[in-house]
């Protein structure tokens, strides 16, 4: 079942808009392997909206994290200004030039997703241009509201709930944060290359770790015992956020639960990989093996098909 089938199921008409959604779907497939696999478990009609949300977020994230050679922070800030102008225009019925923005605006209208979520996301993307570390979890949480929690909140109306949406929202936000914390732990080395540390400084300091020690590990591609202990604590904190998020799965519509359960299990599995490597995040980038991804996804697909057959 390809792009056309999904767009037909979602009721997306018009060749130009369908091409816009196809661009976002391609971005999702190329860059979000775990999320994309989980999305395959959703009913076809719900997938384009998830692709649009992911495609927009990924596109903006790449503007910030993958600047062109010689591109200054001021130039990147100007590009973000242009994104916000495009977004404002598209969300108010005007014209946007960028396909990811057009698909996003259509998804937001179809599912009544508040524009404030996208505004918060753009604010956190701007923070990445100037903020290079976080003193404590309170500072990091403020950043992650826009960069991660609102992603969960954006997706929730697409997935649907069997309880009032307000009851499921804290769990959806927590899952977005849990995913991002896992990224921060997996990508410590890459983030250092961008002059950023997303691990709270107060937690690091409890173990005698600072930016200089992290940079030393990065240069040597080897572990330090103090860093290991700090990462172990942060992994446990991350697991606690997954536990906070997990009850939200049962609050989703039955046809959406297997998708989110799949994403949760697979992404939490990255923490298992980090632990199995004795918290070595310097010599490798930890991923869930393809065989495990398939083992998790196939039963989830079966549960999803059963839920669809029962009209869930």
Image (cartoon, rainbow, N blue to C red):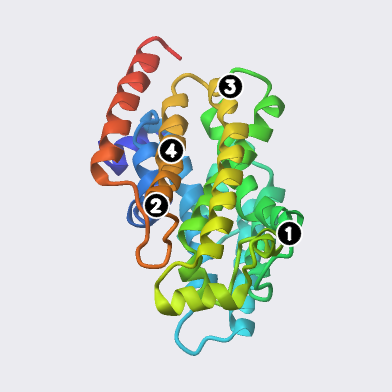
| Residue 175: quadrant of the picture | top right
Residue underneath mark 1: 136
Mark number for residue 263?
4
Q: Which mark's residue is nearer the viewer, 1 or 4?
A: 1
Q: From what the image shows, is residue 123 above or below residue 39?
A: below
**Mark 4 and mark 2 residues within 8 Å of each other at the beta carbon:** no
Of helix, strand and loop, which one carries label 4? Answer: helix
Q: Residue furthest front?
A: 225
Q: Nearer the viewer, mark 4 or mark 2?
A: 4
> CA–CA distance between discs 4 and 2?
11 Å
Tell me the residue at 43%/49% (across/down).
Answer: 275
- 1 or 3: tag closer to the N-terminus: 1
Please identify the residue farthest to the right as the structure is shown: 138
Q: CA distance from mark 1 to mark 3?
A: 31 Å
Between the residue at mark 3 and the residue at mark 2, the CA separation in whole angstroms equals 25 Å
Q: Give the answer, above or below, for where 267 lies relative to 279.
A: above
Q: Is residue 92 visible?
A: no
Mark nearer the viewer, 1 or 2:
1
* Tag 2 residue: 32
How many neighbours does mark 4 have within 10 angstroms: few (below 14), some (14-19), or many (20 or more)? many
Q: Earlier in the sequence, mark 4 or mark 3?
A: 3
Q: Residue at the spot x=33%, y=47% of the render? A: 288
214 vs 176: above or below: below
Look at mark 3 in the image and give the residue it sits on. 251
Relative depth, front residue between 136 and 217:
217
Please state if 168 lies on the left or on the right of 46 as rendered.
right
Among the two numbered marks 4 and 2 on one chain, the one whose residue lies closer to the N terminus: 2
């Amino acid at each position: 079942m390809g792009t056309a089938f999904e767009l037909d199921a979602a009721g997306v008409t018009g060749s130009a808009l369908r091409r816009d959604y196809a661009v976002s779907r391609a971005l999702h497939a190329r860059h979000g392997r775990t999320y994309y696999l989980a999305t395959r478990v959703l009913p076809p009609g719900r997938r384009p909206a998830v692709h649009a949300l992911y495609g927009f977020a990924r596109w903006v994230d790449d503007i910030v994290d993958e600047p062109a050679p010689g591109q200054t922070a001021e130039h990147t800030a100007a590009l973000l200004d242009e994104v916000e102008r495009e977004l404002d225009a598209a969300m108010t019925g005007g014209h946007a030039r960028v396909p990811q923005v057009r698909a996003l605006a259509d998804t937001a209208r179809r599912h009544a997703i508040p524009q404030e979520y996208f505004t918060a996301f753009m604010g956190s993307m701007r923070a990445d241009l100037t903020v290079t570390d976080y003193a404590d979890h309170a500072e990091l949480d403020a950043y992650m509201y826009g960069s991660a929690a609102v992603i969960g909140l954006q997706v929730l109306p697409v997935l649907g709930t069997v309880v009032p949406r307000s009851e499921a929202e804290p769990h959806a936000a927590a899952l977005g944060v849990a995913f991002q914390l896992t990224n921060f732990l997996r990508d410590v080395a890459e983030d250092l290359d961008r002059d950023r540390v997303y691990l709270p400084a107060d937690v690091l300091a409890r173990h005698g770790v600072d930016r200089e020690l992290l940079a030393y590990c990065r240069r040597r591609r080897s572990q330090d015992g103090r860093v290991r202990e700090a990462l172990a604590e942060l992994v446990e904190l991350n697991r606690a956020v997954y536990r906070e998020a997990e009850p939200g799965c049962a609050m989703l519509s039955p046809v959406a639960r297997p998708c989110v359960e799949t994403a949760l299990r697979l992404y939490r599995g990255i923490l298992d990989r980090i632990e199995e490597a004795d918290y070595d995040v310097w010599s490798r980038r930890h991923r869930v093996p393809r065989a495990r991804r398939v083992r998790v996804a196939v039963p989830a697909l079966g549960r999803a098909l059963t839920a669809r057959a029962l009209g869930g």
